[in-house]
Amino acid sequence: MIKKIRPPDDSGRRRPHRPASRLSWWRRVFWRVLAVGLMCCTLAGGTILAVYSHMARSYDLRGLGQMPERTAVLDRKGQVIGRMNGEDRIVVPLSEVSPWFIKALLAREDTRFYTHGGIDFIGVARAMARNLKDGRIVQGASTLTMQLARNSFPDLDDRSFHRKLLEMMLARRIEKYATKNQIIEHYINRIFFGTGIYGIQRASQVYFGKHASQLTLSEAALIAGIIRSPVRFSPFRNYDGAIKERDDVLRRMLAMKMITPQQELAARYDDIILHAQPVFQSQGGYALDAVKKELDLLLEAKEIEDGGLQVFTTLDKDLQTAAEAAVEARLRAVEALPGYAHPSKATFDAAWDLTTEFAATPYLQSAVCLKDNDTGGYLALVGGRDYRQSRFNRALLGSRQIGSTVKPLVYAAAIAAGLQPGSLIQDAPLKPHEIDGADENWNPRNSDGKFLGPTPLITGLVESRNSMTIRIGNYAGLDRVLQLLKEAGFSSKTPRTPQIYIGNVSSSPAQVTNAFSLFPNQGVSRPGHFIERILDKNGNEIYRAEPQDMPILSPGVAHILRRLLAQVIESGTAAAVRNEYGFHEPGGGKTGTTNDYKDAWFAGYTDRLTCGVWVGLDKPLTIVEEGYGGKLAVPIWADVMKKAVALGYVPEAPKVEIPLTRVLLCRTSNDLATDACHLAGMAYEDDIPFELVPQSFCREHTGIGPGAIPPGSPAIPTPPRRSAWERFKGLFR
């Protein structure tokens, strides 16, 4: 076979084969397009990375460790009594978390955490393959660092591609900013573990009732297992689902050789004992409500809502518990009395659906307010028997007639106007038009139905004589009594009627307690408060309560009232304090009972504490026949005060802190007595504060000319000499 040879062209070279030339051209085009495409993709990718890296730099990474915690409310001894505002989180260092949980977390969420730089490219590839296979997103590729970025900055909380890219760039930046252990610590304190639960410490407390450092392998695996869907797999709602997630975590830990087969088997069969953290629903909730209201007045809303504060209160957790227990025990005893005709709390509880709240309850209620005389701070506050059933705070908001509990203030006004403890007051039916401003038919009786005739003033208060008290109030004058009530903290809406002298005054237990604290405090009012100081989340003090002393009564008048009220609990209407309930510390107080036994009161004090107690039904009805304050309120008061003494609030012996002068007085004129007063049997000796010594002699009895000083009569005393230091201190009183 002869092979033809193509003739050469004019240049002497062979012409190219055309098909081979076309293939080479397409190959060149392909590589050029591919190169341009790669360049464009690289340029686009670089641009995207540059843009998102720049966007990631706008985030302040200091926010990683700034996690809103709930505000802690502590008592005066530093014991936590509750939390409020902010997120339910307690931040703990990594060293105080069980190592089992750290291992379970890594097995569940990020097995290559310690080897990647914020983005797990192996995980990304695996997730992409799985999602392409299933045709939908069934697996993510978020590392712990990426999750931390998303949880730390609210604007990253969406499912867009934009968010994912920004999250990845931010994760890279976080890895350079913090160590691996710091990232884990921030993550476990920030992560959401179920409704209202943030951080491993609160999750451990809520689910298992223990510190995060005490978690067992089984418990740690369960908590790690519910992270991806804490609401759906909450062990309280879906126990079987939570156990299934736990077992999956244990299998992964075994596969990663974090645990041995024996440990995995033991953890799988370990009993999970759930311990639901009880909601703070005891009576102490009333005290926390009061703290919250006071906090709202002291700080801006934003400061409060962010949480993380430490609010040191004046409350004493042990006394709070004692007051709650005293109320419940004593009211149950009342409900068991013959003739008690109202539903008992036990009966009400049996029919209650555990969710419904009531503005008023049908069972017997009580309120207690306990105050520190020195500071004005409240040590305990009971607003009712069950905060879950009724959140109405009867201690602060309840306004009920206080009955004879008002009488010490009426007597104080009269003593300031010139009466003396030994002054004779007529205990007899009122005469028409005798009392200024009274209806001519108004003629209240004494509780015993008797009248004693002319009787020393002290007896009127000790035995709570109504007719005497009305005359004493009339002596002081309605304007003076109303002014004193207003200054003592009672409502300015108190009716202008002489009926206020014997109790037609409505008030709350807190107001009554504050008013009675005037007597042990030498007549000075120290406004009641709950918050002593506040620290911000960085430990800086941003508030401290300052004393706000306001003189209301003169020291001399307060001294006389202490003397009278001491007799009330020794031999008067509150003698059960001593005789029946065994409270023997120095002090004083006054009972109160309203018409038809609808309200029972007792307010009393030692030099350390003042306590007010009210007992009654939310709808004013007769509690029980002869339900006097001495029978219903005194037992609660005595229980609380005895517990206070046991806890160290021990009263000191009464001190005479003002000058006293022995003088001879006339029982009818209230002036210095003369020989004629002796002859009339109206003269008596008494030690009274110098400021209350009359400045003239009696002119009511015959035998002595006006202004004359009879032989043998004591001269008008002169004040005792005081040192220069005492006179200097007096300038600031």
Image (cartoon, rainbow, N blue to C red):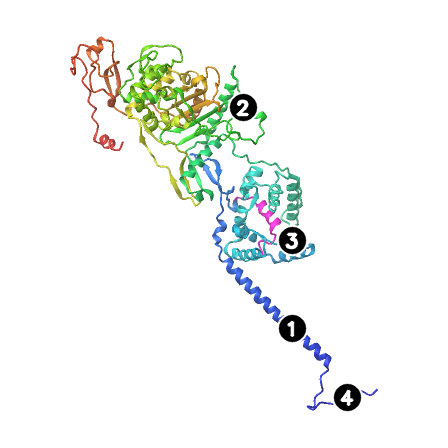
- Label 3, label 2: how far apart the Cα atoms are: 56 Å
Crowd around label 1: few <14 · some 14–19 · many ≥20 (10 Å): few
Mark 4 residue element: loop
- Label 2, label 4: how far apart the Cα atoms are: 121 Å
* N-term-proximal mark, 3 vs 4: 4
Q: Is residue 335 visible?
A: yes
Mark 3 residue element: loop
Per the image, the residue denoted by label 1 is: 31
Amino acid identity at mark 3: Ile
Amino acid identity at mark 4: Ile
Q: Is residue 638 magenta?
A: no
- Label 4, label 1: how far apart the Cα atoms are: 35 Å
Q: Nearer the viewer, mark 1 or mark 2?
A: 2
Q: Is residue 631 visible?
A: no
* Numbered badge on residue 345: 2
Q: Is residue 610 left or right of residue 16?
A: left
Q: Is residue 112 magenta?
A: yes
- Label 3, label 4: how far apart the Cα atoms are: 65 Å
* Numbered badge on residue 5: 4
